Image (tube, rainbow, N blue to C red):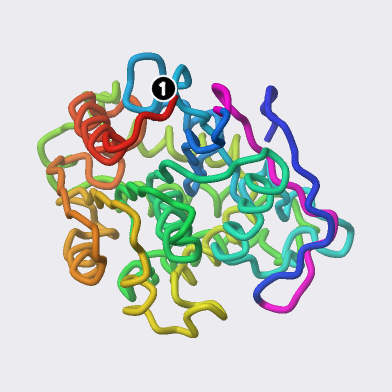
Amino acid sequence: MSLTGHSSFDLGDVRLLSGETLPNAQLAYKTYGRLNAAGDNVVVLPTFFTGTHRRNEGFFGPGRAIDPEHHFVVSINMFGNGLSTSPSHAAPGQQGAWFPEVTLYDNVQCQYRLLFDHLGVQRIALVAGWSMAGCQAYHWAALYPDLVDAIIPFCASARTSPHNFVFLEGVKAALLADRCWDGDGGMPPPIRGLKAFARVYAGWAYSQTFFRDGHYRKLGYESIEDLLVDWENDHVEHWNAHDLLAKIWSWQRNDISANPLYGGDFRSALRAISARAIVIPCTQDLYFPPEDNRLEVEEMPNAELRPYDSPFGHCVANPGNDAEFEEFLDAAIHDVLQPNDYT
C-alpha cells in the first residue's frame, strides 16, 4: 500500500504485551490543524480494520464537529494496516507469518508515545473511531483516564464478543483455504482466498434488510453480485493477506482489561473510564450489536448509549454511505466537546 502525505514516528524496538519485541517499529500518522498553547485541543482518530489516515478524513472537515480550524486532529495508522509496521514490510525475520502478536493495548501504548513524547500533546479532548478504531478509543479511556476528556466509539466494543470472534474465524478460514496458501508468504498471493474472504465479509458488513430491500443500489451497484465483485477487487488490489490476519488477531483479542493495569477485570476497566462517552451502535450491525454496548455503558460512570438504526449495518459509518449518520455522529461529537472551548 502506498499513500503519500503522512509522517512516520520511529519507535525503536517495542516490547509488546506478549513479551516479544517489534524491532525498528514505526507509526504512520497525519496531523491536521494546529496544537494550541495548552496542548489540549487534540482529537485522536485511530484507524479501523481496512482503514488508513486517508479514509479517516471522511469523519472531519471545515464546519463539522471535528474541525481542523479549532482542533489538532491526529490520525494514527494501526499496526498491520500496511503503513505502520506490518507483516508486509516488517524487519527481516518478522515478515509474513512471522509477524509478532500485536494487541490494541500495544497500539495505544505506542500512540501515547507519539502524542505525548513527540507531538507535545498535554491532554486529549476526544478519541473517536469506527469499528477497531472505536475499540482503541475504549482502550485510551481505560488506560489513561486522567488524560482523555471524551470518547465516541461507534460500531465498536470494549471487548470482542464470542460471536464476533466466531465471525472473524469464518473470514479467516475462507482466506486460509486457498490452496496457494503456505503460511509464510513464499507462494504467490492467495488471490482465491482474498476473494473468498471478501465475499464472506460482505455478508456480515451489511444487514439482512440491506440486501432484501436492495439498498446496495444506493451505493451504485446494480446487483448483489456487483457489490461482491467490487469487494473482491478491493481486497485483491489493496490488501496483503498477512496484514489482514495480523489485524484479525488483534481484533479477536480486543479487551480493555487484558493488560497489567486491570489483570482481566473487565468491569473495573469499564468503571475506570471517567471520560464523557457517547457510545453509538447501529441497531442492525451484525457483529457489534447494541446489547454488548448496553452492558458496557451500564458500568461506565459518564456514558450514554445512543443507538442509530440503519439497514447499512456495520457499514453505516463508512464515510459517504449515509449522510444522516454523518449528521448524527457530528451531533454526538458536538455534545461531548461542548463543555470545553478548544481554541
Q: 32 left or right of 315? A: right
Q: 303 left or right of 75? A: left
Circle 1 sits in a helix, a strand or a loop, which is it?
Answer: loop
What is the span of residues highlighted in magenta in the rendered image?
18-36
Image quarter of the C terminus? top left
Residue 128 occupies quadrant: top left
Task: Give the x, y percent position of residue 255.
Answer: 44, 71
Above-or-below relation of 138 to 259: above
Task: Give the x, y percent position of residue 227.
Answer: 34, 34
Q: Magenta region, mostly helix, strand or loop?
A: strand
For the view shown, which residue lies furthest in the right direction?
92
Kindly identify the residue that appears in the image at 40 percent across and 84 percent down: 265
Kindly identify the residue that appears in the image at 34 percent across and 67 percent down: 164
Above-or-below relation of 90 to 219: below
Residue 177 at least partly seen? no
- Quick one: 44 or 56, which is closer to the camera? 44
For the view shown, which residue lies furthest in the front direction?
38
Residue 193 at least partly seen? yes
Task: Give the x, y percent position of residue 71.
Answer: 46, 27
- Quick one: 88 or 276, which is closer to the camera? 276
Image quarter of the N terminus? top right
- Counting other residues with Cα less than 10 Å from the Cα at mark 1, is it few (<14), some (14-19), or many (20 or more)? some
Above-or-below relation of 180 to 48: below
Amino acid at pointer 1: Asp
Kindly identify the residue that appears in the image at 57 percent across and 23 percent down: 34
Q: Which residue is mark 1?
A: 67
Q: 146 left or right of 219? A: right
Residue 295 occupies quadrant: bottom left
Q: 225 left or right of 303? A: right
- Quick one: 89 or 275, which is closer to the camera? 275
**Residue 113: within the magenta?**
no
